[in-house]
Image: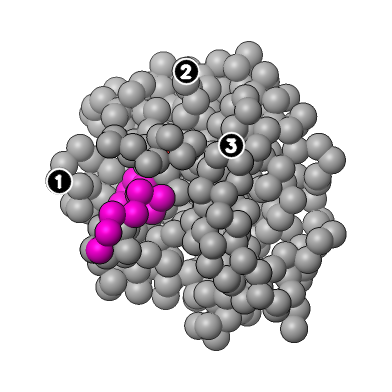
């Protein structure tokens, strides 16, 4: 048995820089036709020079694969209409992080006073630049996403023509908010479709499952699965694949991020097959994103075959999600 996906896309991807980029980028570029590249580097991607250098570094790392890196800027309220008009063709979206809620977000937005953010958001709306949001507050860790939902509603109402993407949603409340506003969209990760808080912390602590937002309750995971398996037209796959070296994960202060890129497609096919939802997968991993972002990725066909495949224990210094487990599908070598 086999399945062929046309132009699979990963609409939330951390590639890092330097040696880590060289290690992980080819793995995404092998299996996907494109990805939305997150800007939370140190320092973050906020200038045209940094954007161009970073894109060039990615381009060199992914050769010879066919893969489009869709670039993003790190949101600051200092971006003017003129600045954005000039850089518009070099980016696909702008990513907003509340200050301090996740890895390398210290320089994010400290206040959601919409008066402060409005000029930049209005310019983005006029220039049709989508806004991607890490929607968490600094509150109690299980409630952070739910506490942020009023801000999503406010943004959706104040900027009705702005394409807003709720990144890596994890709760049934977030699904509800998504459904209530036409200009809200969402990405769902692989690990939030697979895990709950029990997998992370219910038995022995599993640092390689630790990420922001943390996985939640079984009923939250069920709501995410139903949304993905129905390939709702405003939902997309975004792995949030976020590699950290083993020394940063197996440590007293464990870094947040789960590395899923090299096994994302086989694991998705397995999950969708078990749910009898394979016919929704093409929309979830490509077609919806193409429509939402108005992109035309390379016409790359990625074939998966139903043969047991053991996820490697590590890729260099990075331990992947589901390390060592056997999946029922593998990507066919091109
Ligand atoms: C991401 C990272 O490591 O860059 N970590 C994570 O837990 N998801 C940042 C992010 O997307 O929150
Ligand atoms: Zn992320």
Q: Residue at x 62, y 54 (%)?
A: 262
Query: Label 2 crowding class (10 Å Cα cut-off): few <14, some 14-19, many 20+?
Result: few
* Image spot of residue 207 (x, y percent): 35, 49
In the picture, residue 67 is in which quadrant? top right
Q: Is mark 1 within 8 Å of ligand 1?
A: no
Left or right of 132 in this view: 329: right
Q: Which residue is mark 1?
A: 140
- Asked if 103 appears above or below 229 in the picture, the reply is above
Give residue 15's mark: 3
Q: Which residues are magenta?
A: 203-214
Query: Label 3 crowding class (10 Å Cα cut-off): few <14, some 14-19, many 20+?
Result: many
* Secondary structure that dominates the magenta span: loop
Q: Is residue 297 magenta?
A: no
The answer, for residue 271, to whether it is visible in the render is yes
Label 1 to label 2: alpha-carbon separation: 27 Å
Left or right of 189 in this view: 174: left
Q: Residue at x 40, y 35 (%)?
A: 248
Q: Which residue is mark 2?
A: 43
Label 2 to label 3: alpha-carbon separation: 15 Å
Q: Could you tell me which secondary element the residue under label 3 belongs to?
A: loop
Give residue 60's mark: none
In the picture, residue 119 is in which quadrant? top left
Q: Residue at x 63, y 33 (%)?
A: 21
First of labels 1, 2 by sequence position: 2
Q: Could you tell me which secondary element the residue under label 1 belongs to?
A: loop
Q: Residue at x 49, y 56 (%)?
A: 321
Q: Could you tell me which secondary element the residue under label 2 belongs to?
A: loop
Query: Label 1 crowding class (10 Å Cα cut-off): few <14, some 14-19, many 20+?
Result: few
The scheme the figure's colours follow is one colour
* Image spot of residue 146 (x, y percent): 22, 53
Q: Is residue 212 magenta?
A: yes
């Amino acid at each position: 048995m086999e399945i062929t996906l046309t132009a699979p896309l990963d609409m939330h991807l951390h590639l890092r820089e330097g040696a880590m980029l060289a290690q992980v980028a080819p793995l995404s570029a092998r299996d996907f036709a494109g990805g939305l590249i997150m800007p939370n580097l140190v320092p973050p991607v906020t200038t045209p020079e940094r954007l161009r250098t970073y894109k060039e570094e990615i381009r060199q790392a992914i050769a010879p694969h066919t893969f489009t890196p869709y670039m993003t800027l790190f949101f600051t309220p200092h971006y003017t209409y003129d600045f954005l008009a000039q850089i518009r063709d070099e980016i696909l979206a702008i990513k907003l992080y509340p200050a301090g809620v996740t890895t390398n977000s210290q320089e994010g937005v400290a206040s959601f006073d919409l008066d402060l953010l409005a000029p930049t958001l209005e310019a983005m709306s006029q220039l049709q630049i989508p806004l991607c949001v890490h929607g968490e507050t600094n509150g109690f860790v299980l409630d952070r996403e739910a506490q942020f939902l009023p801000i999503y509603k406010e943004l959706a109402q104040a900027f009705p023509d702005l394409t807003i993407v709720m990144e890596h949603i994890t709760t049934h409340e977030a699904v509800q908010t998504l459904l209530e506003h036409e200009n809200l969209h969402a990405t769902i990760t692989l690990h939030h479709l697979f895990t709950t808080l029990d997998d992370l912390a219910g038995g022995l602590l599993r640092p390689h499952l630790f990420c922001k937002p943390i996985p939640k309750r079984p009923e939250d995971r069920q709501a995410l699965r139903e949304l993905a398996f129905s390939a709702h037209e405003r939902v997309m796959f975004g792995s949030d694949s976020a590699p950290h070296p083993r020394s940063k994960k197996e440590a007293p202060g464990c870094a947040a991020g789960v590395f899923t890129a090299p096994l994302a497609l086989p694991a998705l096919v397995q999950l969708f097959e078990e749910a009898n939802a394979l016919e929704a997968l093409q929309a979830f991993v490509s077609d919806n994103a193409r429509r939402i972002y108005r992109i035309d990725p390379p016409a790359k066909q990625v074939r998966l075959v139903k043969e047991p495949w053991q996820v490697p224990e590590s890729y260099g210094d990075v331990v992947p999600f589901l390390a060592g487990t056997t999946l029922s599908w593998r990507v066919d070598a091109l």
